[in-house]
Amino acid sequence: MEVKKKQIAILGSTGSIGTQALEVISEYSDLFEVEVLTANNNSALLIEQAKKYKPNTVVITNEDKYKEVDDALFDLGIKVFAGQQSLEEVVEGENIDVVLTALVGYSGLKPTIHAIKSGKNIALANKETLVVAGDLITKLCQEYSVSIYPVDSEHSAIFQCLVGEQYNLIEKIYLTASGGPFRGKLRNDLLDITKAQALKHPNWDMGAKITIDSATLMNKGLEVIEAKWLFDLKAEQIEVVVHPQSIIHSAVQFEDGSIKAQLGLPDMKLPIQYALGFPERLKNSFKRFNFLDYPNLTFEKPDLETFRNLDLAYTAMSKGGNMPCILNAANEIAVAAFLKDEIGFLNMSDLIANCMEKITFVPNPSYEDFVETDRQTRILASKLL
Ligand code: NDP
Ligand code: MG
């Protein structure tokens, strides 16, 4: 019997996660088919991808590039749309089974809400969606019976450890962190860090924003908040452990003290394929981990004084309400400014802390409150630069 292929919409197909997801889809073309591809600016790659994967629809959010994309794809019968709002509309397409959210930052929130409200399961790479509005998103998932399959490697690890454990309570989880390129450095060492130094991650090759977040440990902070919502945990149940080799992708400790961990060589294609293929494990030929190549797997406590962003994320999570939204918006402005050489490496934390103090706290935010908080925080952060 022929199996119906899963129809996948990839939001952000030209990015690091998006392109790796397309490699996975090529590998399992008997299981998956591309229904939607989207890019922000990279029209050339979007056109190339569309010619190869023949989706039903593509979106280029930068409207200036619409004509170029439409001219290139018109003869293939591929529908082309432009603008941010088109992202919200295309995820509702009735053929789509799974929406892979691989956009960067706050831009992922609204399309994800639309996808959930139209009953699509979510393969979630865009962690900022859960950071900004985790409470709203998890409630919507319950209301519309939608599942979230985590793509982030740590959360995929925990998700994998929880298979078969539905009646067993989690005592705590250990989120592992590589420590980034500046592990072991002190504040004084980081005063003159350049973006070129910060963009060199020791273990993972990723988009620019998450690479800077990894260097400041904000990425781990965002992941702590992401884990809280995905696995319904309290702050004290989430411990970050620095593990420079990135072999143990994270671990779960149960109430009997037993710990389950998921291990493997660092390769995002594995969590991507697990999220798309769930509940099945798909056979692949990726390089296998060999214990004897890694006789020294090591573990350290994170340095919260040097890497204040992780501490700020814990604070934002404990305060709740719109505080993680403030943290996220200020961080997006800080990272963009750092990438334009407008602020120093350590000033990013100062800017975020400043916004967390000054923006009005809303304890029980609605969707509109998140939009307003994001807007106000961006204005304030840009002024404070
Ligand atoms: P990239 O910067 O490599 O790619 C981002 C994608 O989103 C591109 O297709 C880009 O289009 C598009 N995009 C960017 N901004 C917008 C916008 N405002 N509106 C619409 N589209 C936009 O990012 P990554 O793939 O590295 O990361 C994607 C998400 O996955 C992030 O949330 C990140 O935290 C998360 N993640 C990434 C990991 C990784 O290994 N890369 C690991 C775990 C999580 P264009 O190319 O045209 O600019
Ligand atoms: Mg991660």
Image (cartoon, rainbow, N blue to C red):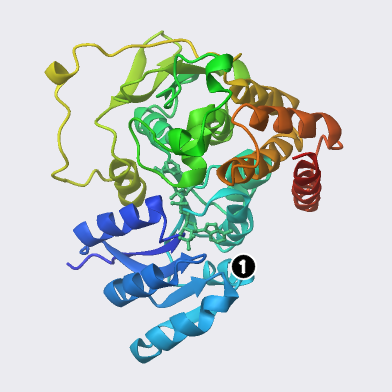
Depth check: 85 or 195 in front?
Answer: 195
Observer able to see residue 171: no
Asked if residue 296 is positioned above or below residue 86 in the image, the reply reads above
Left or right: 330 with respect to 58? Answer: right
Asked if residue 82 is positioned above or below residue 339 in the image, the reply reads below
Query: Residue 112, located in which quarter of the rendered image?
Result: bottom right
Given the image, on which type of amino acid does mark 1 rest?
Answer: Gln
Rendered location of residue 370, percent (x, y): 75, 47
User: Residue most toward the bottom?
Assistant: 75
The residue pinned by badge 1 equals 84
- What residue is at 37 percent from the left and 11 percent from the top? 299
Quick one: label 1, few (<14), some, or many (20+) residues within 10 Å? Answer: some
Depth check: 132 or 147 in front?
Answer: 132
- What residue is at 12 percent from the left and 17 percent from the top? 292
Query: Residue 306, located in which quarter of the rendered image?
Result: top right
Observer able to see residue 9: yes
- What residue is at 57 percent from the left and 77 percent from the top? 64
**How many labels sit on residues?**
1
Asked if residue 93 is positioned above or below residue 114 in the image, the reply reads below
- What residue is at 26 percent from the left and 57 percent from the top? 23
Rendered location of residue 43, percent (x, y): 44, 72
Rendered location of residue 137, percent (x, y): 62, 46
The answer to whether the residue bearing label 1 lies less than 8 angstroms from the nearest atom of ligand 1 is yes
